[in-house]
Image (cartoon, rainbow, N blue to C red):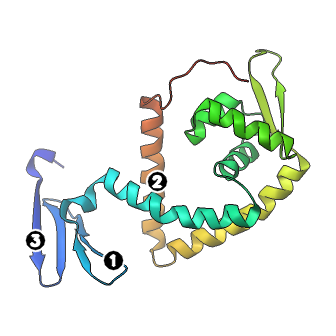
Amino acid sequence: MNRSAISPYFQRNGNLASFGCWGCDMVRVTKLATSSGLEVELGPLSGDLLFLARNLHILLRGESFSIRQNMGMEAGVIAILSVVWLNPGISQNELASAIVLRKAAVTKLVKKMEADGLLSRRRTSHDRRTNSLMLTEKGQQTIAKIRPMTATLQHQLFEPIDAEEKEVFFDVLTNLVAQLSGRVAAFPEDDEED
């Protein structure tokens, strides 16, 4: 499709407000119901990634907190357990990059998780500055408890969403994260690990 032929439009039709473009099939509802029932007009903000990502992050923070609280964990631990579970032997630098945390924050969490018996770390033979991370038996048991909780929560969150839309959502989100990860150095630091 010729992008220059696409021009944005905003239209109001009764109680439905939509923002889309001429020459494409995209139409997005742009009203948001607040907790008091008032509808707030979003207009072009309904297509603003930073605005929507910020709102989604804040809305999901409570959901994430409930799982962490249930498991007695601080922020970042579930992400670390999940990534190490799927990538045994991952280095701390690779882990920090994968979960978009500063290396110092990952080092602090890994040390605590090691002290709690969830992780083990070893210096790799090819680079003495690099730690290889593995889940311990306790870490394996913990992730086995966490996965059903996160799966249930995800099912609840996406219950009103069509399966095809959910798949497209994750495809786009995963592609965007990959694009940004390859393009942006989130936290430039030196390569040494503690």
Amino acid carrying label 3: it is Gln
Q: Which residue is mark 2?
A: 171
Q: Nearer the viewer, mark 1 or mark 2?
A: 1
Q: Residue furthest right?
A: 137
Please rate how many residues cluster around mark 3, counting C-alpha atoms within 10 Å: few if below 14, some from 14 to 19, many from 20. few
Q: Which mark is residue 46?
A: none
State the count of labels: 3
> What is the distance, in whole Å, between disc 3 and disc 2 at their CAs?
29 Å
Which of the pair 8/66 is nearer the observer?
A: 66
Q: Which mark is residue 34?
A: 1
Q: Helix, strand, or loop for circle 2?
A: helix
Contact between labelled residues 3 and 1, with CB atoms less than 8 Å apart? no
Residue 122 in sight from this viewpoint: yes
Task: Give the image quarter of residue 83.
Answer: top right
Residue 67 versus residue 74 in the image, above or below: below
Left or right, residue 6 beside residue 160: left
Which of the pair 145/162 is nearer the observer?
A: 145
Residue 69's x, y, as percent?
A: 70, 64
Residue 168 in sight from this viewpoint: no
Residue 35's x, y, as percent?
A: 37, 79
